[in-house]
Amino acid sequence: MKKAIVLVSLLLLASGLCAAGTGSNLVLNLGVMTDDGLSFSPFIWTAGLELDLQLGKYLMLSPEATLAQNGFKFKEFLLFPGAVLNFTPGSFFVGGGLVKGIYIGSGQAFVSDDFSLKLNAGFLTENLKLTAYAITSFDNLFSDMLVGASLGFRF
């Protein structure tokens, strides 16, 4: 848990340093996630917070934290803190980065030892961010993935 807190703190610090003098947007998003078979069994909803930091004309760094919940029991959660670097030619974006899964529930927390690869693509407007993404382990690249989509509100 300490490593996850340190990771999130460093990402937020880096975000603040990068935001000075560049365009940035806070993004609140809601979405869904499932396995790579698109079964939606179980149904996983997500809620997240991102900070989009425009680094020049074509790059955007997005530190993020996404909370994932299976169903509507509100007893166990997965937290995915991470950062994604996106290529942004206009209103379309595509990129990749690292996330780390943290299980929170039943009075305990468990942090995965490994980072996972997150690939994403989507569209940006002044007020909205539509994203499709895949999260995959480096051990089983593009096998047993989580795939999802989210709609974000940019401030």
Image (spheres, grey):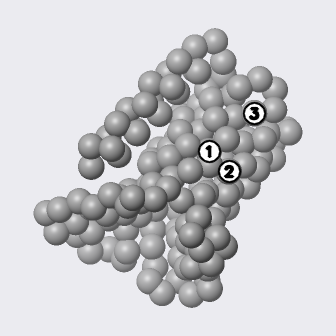
Residue 125 vs residue 100, the one in the foreground: 100
Q: Relative to 140, is 62 above or below? A: above
Q: Look at the numbered disc 1 and give the secondary structure of its residue.
A: strand
Which amino acid does the dot numbered 3 rest on? Answer: Leu
Cβ–Cβ under 8 Å for marks 2 and 1? yes
Quadrant hosting residue 58: top right
Task: Name, please, the residue furthest toward the left.
Answer: 107
Would you place residue 140 above or below residue 110 in this image? below
Locate residue 112, reporting x and y percent: 38, 61
Point 59% across, 31% down: residue: 25
Give the secondary structure at mark 2: strand
Residue under the point 81% across and 47% down = 92
* Residue 96 numbered mark, or none: 2
Residue 61 rendering spot, x and y as whole percentages? 64, 35
Does residue 44 appear in this view? yes
Query: Taking the image as drawn, is residue 148 in sight?
Result: no
Q: Is residue 78 left or right of residue 31?
A: left
Q: Position of residue 89 (x, y in %)?
A: 86, 39
- Amino acid on which disc 2 is placed: Gly
**At x 44% / y 24%, what residue is drawn?**
13
- Given the current orientation, which residue lies at the most extreme right position? 89
Judge from the rendering whether residue 66 lies leftward or rightward of residue 55; answer left or right.
left
Read off the residue under disc 3.
59
Few, some or many residues within 10 Å of mark 3 (<14, 14–19, 20+): some
Residue bearing the label numbered 1? 84
Q: Nearer the viewer, residue 23 or 113?
A: 113
Q: Earlier in the sequence, mark 2 or mark 1?
A: 1
The C terminus, quarter of image: top right
Q: CA distance from mark 2 to mark 3?
A: 12 Å
- The CA span between labels 2 and 1 is 5 Å
